[in-house]
Amino acid sequence: MNRYSMVVQWSNEDQLFLVTIPEFSDRVLMPCTHGSTREEAIHNGEDVIEMYLEAWQADGEAIPEPRTLQVA
């Protein structure tokens, strides 16, 4: 299970749910995927996270750390 953040937002212009991965924002063009339903967008977002992690690992690149919620 990955622990990366995923932001899913509706786009009136595109008529799609757009997905951004905050931890990848300095390395990947955002939004990085989409879906016609929220569920499809989330599924596609999870696929994109895995794809980038595998590619960066294969290339020996540094992998961004997942952000975690800090509860006081």
Image (cartoon, helix red, strand yellow):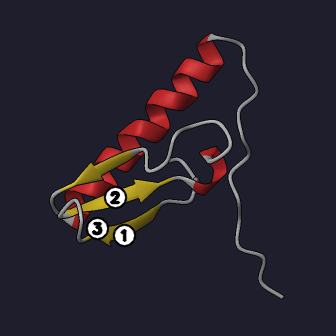
Label 3–label 1 contact, CB within 8 A:
yes
Instruction: Point out residue 29 in the picture as x, y percentages from the top left corner.
Output: 52, 40
Label 1–label 2 contact, CB within 8 A:
yes
Distance in Å between CA atoms under marks 1 and 2: 5 Å
Q: What kind of element bears circle 3?
A: strand
Nearer the N terminus, badge 1 or badge 2?
Answer: 1
Q: Amino acid at mark 2?
A: Leu
Q: Amino acid at mark 1?
A: Gln
Q: Residues within 10 Å of mark 3 (few under 14, many from 20)?
A: few
> Going 49% across and 48% down the picture, which residue do you hit?
30
Nearer the N terminus, badge 2 or badge 3?
Answer: 3
Along the viewing direction, whichever of 59 and 17 lies nearer the viewer? 17
Q: Amino acid at mark 3?
A: Ser
Which numbered marker is on residue 19? none
Q: Residues within 10 Å of mark 1 (few under 14, many from 20)?
A: some
Q: Which callout, 2 or 3, points to the residue nearer the camera? A: 3
> Going 34% across and 58% down the picture, which residue do you hit?
18
Q: Is residue 66 above or below residue 53?
A: below
Residue 44 position by quadrant: top left
Along the viewing direction, whichever of 69 and 21 lies nearer the viewer? 21
Task: Indicate the quadrant containing the C terminus: top left, top right, bottom left or bottom right.
Answer: bottom right
Which numbered marker is on residue 11? 3
Name the residue that disc number 1 marks.
Answer: 9
Instruction: Point out residue 31 in the picture as x, y percentages from the top left corner.
Output: 43, 50
Instruction: Point out residue 13 in the picture as x, y percentages from the top left corner.
Output: 24, 65
Instruction: Point out residue 27 in the picture as x, y percentages from the top left corner.
Output: 64, 36
Label 2–label 3 contact, CB within 8 A:
yes
Distance in Å between CA atoms under marks 3 and 1: 6 Å
Name the residue that disc number 2 marks.
Answer: 18
Point out the residue furthest to the front here.
13
> Going 78% across and 76% down the picture, which residue do you hit?
70
